[in-house]
Amino acid sequence: MAYSVNISVEAPIENQIQEITYDGQEIYQAPLTLSENLAKIAQKIDFSKTNGEEVKKEQLEGNEKNEEDTKDPASFQSSLWPWDSVRNKLRNALTEVCVLADVLAIAKERNYMVLDPTSHESADVKPMIQVYARKKALAGAASVLMMGTERLRNCQAELARTRSTPDFHIELLRLRQNWRLKKVSNSIIGDLSYRTAGSKYTQTGMFEVTKAEEEEKSSNSPPASPNTGSSMSGQSHGPSNSKASALRVTIPSELQGVAYIEVLCQKDQEDLCSANISLLNSSANNSNTDMHWQQKLEAAQNVLFCKELFSQLAREAVHLRAPIPHMVVGNQIMATVLPGIQLIIGLCHSTGNDKKPTAPPPHKTDHDHVLEHSLHQLLREVHYNNSNHPFPHPASGPLGPSKRRYVAGPTAADRYELLEMTKSQTLLEQIIQQAQHFFMRLRTEYVLDTIAKEVKDPLIVSHWNALNSPTQSCVKINILTHGYDSVCRTSMVVHVGEKSLKCVCRDGRVMHMSYEPQELRDLIFCQIYQHQISAVQALAKCMGWQFLANSSHLGLGSVEPLGNASSCILASPIGDRMIAVRCEPQTGVQVAIAHSPRKDFFPGQLVRERKWENLGGSFKEVRWDKMEGKNFLNKMELLMASLTSS
């Protein structure tokens, strides 16, 4: 038997689809406004139907209505007006609203009718019933609290039981947050290599992750690895080492232990500088059996990094053509930096299974942090260049060429420029260049410090630039006299390169020197004595003396083994006194004075007139070591003052 069921059908919320474009985009119809929706609903009303009252009225007055319809067709059309029923319903609603308004006005104003409440008899409530009701309500609330307490107690007991055995999946989730994992059949394989960072090292860094069993945790322990006592930087990756882990990480034997790169510079079997690179900064002595999987993987990744770095350096050492060939013997690379100085790069790998661990040499403790940072940075830069290529412009261009090669066509680059664009330095070349610059900087510092100790007058002040590159540094040298720094100051700038020095003097001259420190020493001594002559001339202007002559390369006297002698001649304000100053890099400063007129002038047969006695007599050397004064310019000031007043 079929039953009739009322089904309500509602319009869908979303609009209808008007058009579907070729790319799959759907264009919907705009929703109807209120007026359009009202017109749509009004069209669905069947106004031909009449209500029950109109049917009865038509039955009673059917004959009269038929006659009126036949007589007057216009009135028949007006009775069938579509909005007639709506008008009647609105009129009835208006009537009802007006009646309701009148009733509310009568009840509110109280002018016509007063509404008074009636009193009801209050029921008697016994106090014991209220007490029993409250007691029952409190008992229900107490039972709910007790049930919640019991659930919390059971949860705490369960956590206490499972705390000793951490969840395998939670540990696996933490492992996956820091390392790359994949599932191969029934095994979980991880990768700790730098391939995602741009490394092209052939050795794989695969490790296997298994679930540690209870009996294995109690009997066996993970392999040893360094730096377990040190705290992990940043957030903690897992539980502490005292708790047993639910994971067991199996690392290949060639990646176990500790590895670091040792950089050593030797000169005549003497260690000048050394650097150790180790990502964990650890040694084989502080190995621990209670190793967490995070530290094990970091130690294995450190071994892989050091092996990749050494293999790259060894391959470059074999292919490079140097004046003195590089040597690769075992785990050591020997390269010549400067004559008599060798750079030794060694790979040290200890698995921690040695019966007699050897103590590290003393020089390994005092390593150079700059070299260590450079070794990190060079390989990281290679990884970055392998994975990050400049975007082509335009976008249809090839991917890979540098920005300089992109503009080689518009700038009409020749063959030489194109070949220069293709050249790049290897890691070994960059390390050798940094080592060469290190020695050049060390020699320059030694020369400047030695001269500053030897020469007390004038003072030598060196200012090293704090912003330098690994292969370029700059030092500004100021030569001044104490107490007279505002009178005269000689400045020079020395650019320290890889195998050469470039000096820019105060007068704009540029001099290039080799790696020999004696050349820089000779140049500074020449600048010192030229400074003395310039300072004397500046002091003479302040004292009112006249400057007569000057020579930076004096050709008189004995030949100097280093540079040339320089001299100047000064005259007093009235011209009756003269001072001659001679500066030699080897013998030092010589000062002589002359008087005018000459006291020893005697007229002869050739020179008879007395006017020739004003030319001045012969110069007499001053015993400069017996003069009073703190320094050279102070003595000259006192000498000029005494000659002027006499």
Image (spheres, helix red, strand yellow):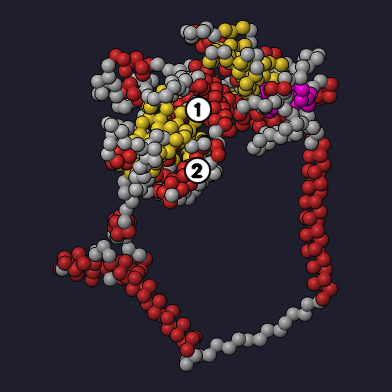
Magenta span of residues: 284-301
* Residue in the image at 48% along x and 25% along y: 522
Tag 2 secondary structure: helix
Tag 1 secondary structure:
loop
Residue type at tag 1: Thr
Q: Is residue 554 left or right of residue 231?
A: left
Identify residue type, mark 2. Lys
Residue 322 visible, this orientation: yes
According to the picture, the residue beneath numbered tag 2 turns out to be: 635
Q: Please provide percent x and percent y for residue 478.
A: 47, 37
Q: What is the quadrant of residue 374 in the picture? A: top right
Task: Find residue 587 and name its label.
Answer: 1
Please tell me which residue is depicted at 42% across the width and 83% down the height of the picture. Answer: 102
Say above or below: 230 vs 58: above
> On the picture, is 443 further left or further right than 609?
right
**Residue 513 visible in rendering:** no
Figure quadrant of residue 314? top right
**Quadrant of res 136:** bottom right
How packed mark 1 is, by other alpha carbons closer than 10 Å (few <14, some 14-19, many 20 or more), is few
Of the pair 400 and 150, the residue shown nearer to us: 400
> 260 or 87, which lies in front?
260
Point out residue 386 in the picture as x, y percentages from the top left corner.
47, 21
Question: In the image shown, does 446 or 91 lie closer to the viewer?
Answer: 446
In the drawing, does residue 174 fall left or right of residue 194?
right
The location of residue 569, given as percent across then percent down, is: 37, 37
The residue under the point 24% across, 20% down is 412
Choose between 281 and 169: the one closer to the eye. Answer: 281
User: If you read the primary sequence from the N terminus, does the residue marked by circle 1 or circle 2 appear first?
Assistant: 1
User: Magenta includes 643?
Assistant: no
